[in-house]
Image (cartoon, helix red, strand yellow):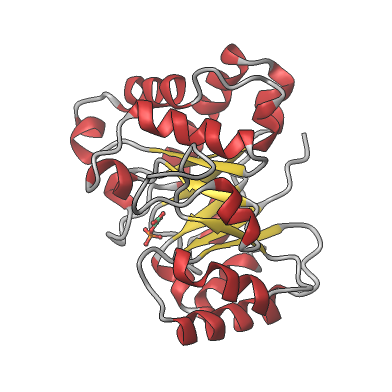
Amino acid sequence: MNRRPLLAGNWKMHTTVMEACQLAAEIGKCSAGLADRDVLLAPPYTVLSEVAHVLQGSEVLIASQNVCWEEKGAFTGEISPTMVTSAGGSAAIIGHSERRQIFHEDEEIINKRVHGALTFGLMAIFCIGETLEEREADKTFELLESQIRAGLAGVTAEAMKKVVVAYEPVWAIGTGKTATKEQAQEVHAFIRKLLAEMFEKDIAESVRILYGGSVKPDNVDELMAQPDIDGALVGGAALDAESFCRIINFT
Ligand code: PEP
């Protein structure tokens, strides 16, 4: 199965309006003409529409870093799927480990967010990953299975066409420690097998599974060469135009 690679940059809580526009413009330039892969940026909410504006006419996709399940209402601090769309976005990151760990978002809320994104036509970039203690206690696969079953509960096979899974071991995020290509491939193959059990083989074969956790210019090529790694979700290195440009131009 030919899955189109997806290279996504998560800017987290970084960039002023000016910095965001400048970074977006540089990434727009270095992604021009990359016809065989998707490039996506997830800037802070405050600059979603500015970044979309800067990238108008390019192929770069825009995502929000989270999304609510409701279209509007009394949900202070949240962003709705239609707000994302109206700002020029077409995707949302959901269940990032920082949301799970710092803001205590649980499986139920993450599942509601996934449904919210899909109901309103956004691509859902659904993140999962184990902590160091869970890995050391040999709980990685058990934990990932429960995150996937809970986060994707009630999602239909048809809706899975708009889901991207991002495997991000918590111990590798922002730490400079990357999973080895073998560790990452082992987990990605496990996720695909589980998706085949939950949905069907064709769906599992077509879902893109991204790796995230200290992806850098010097490790992206070997990660992307793994058969079940279909892209990367990049944090730190996505804030530096030169590094991110090298990452999206992986060979
Ligand atoms: C992330 O935030 O999703 C991430 C993977 O961060 P970093 O690349 O900095 O480890």
Residue that appears at 56% across and 47% down? 81
> Considering depth in this image, is 209 or 16 the residue closer to the camera?
16
Is residue 240 positioned above or below 168 on the image?
below
Which quadrant is the C terminus positioned in? bottom right
The extreme front residue here reads 73
Q: In the picture provided, is 100 more to the left or to the right than 126?
A: left
Q: Quadrant of ligand 1?
A: bottom left
Residue 155 seen anywhere in this rendered image of the structure: yes
Picture quarter with the N terminus: top right
| Res. 201 image quadrant | top right
Residue placed at 48% from the left, 61% from the top?
Answer: 219
Q: Quadrant of residue 130?
A: top left
Expressed as whole percent of the image width and height from the top left, the position of residue 49 reads 59, 70
Residue 228 seen in render:
no
Vertically, is 13 above or below 93?
A: below
Residue 204, percent from left and from top: 65, 25
Residue 44 x, y percent position in the rendering: 44, 66
Left or right: where does residue 107 sit relative to residue 93?
left
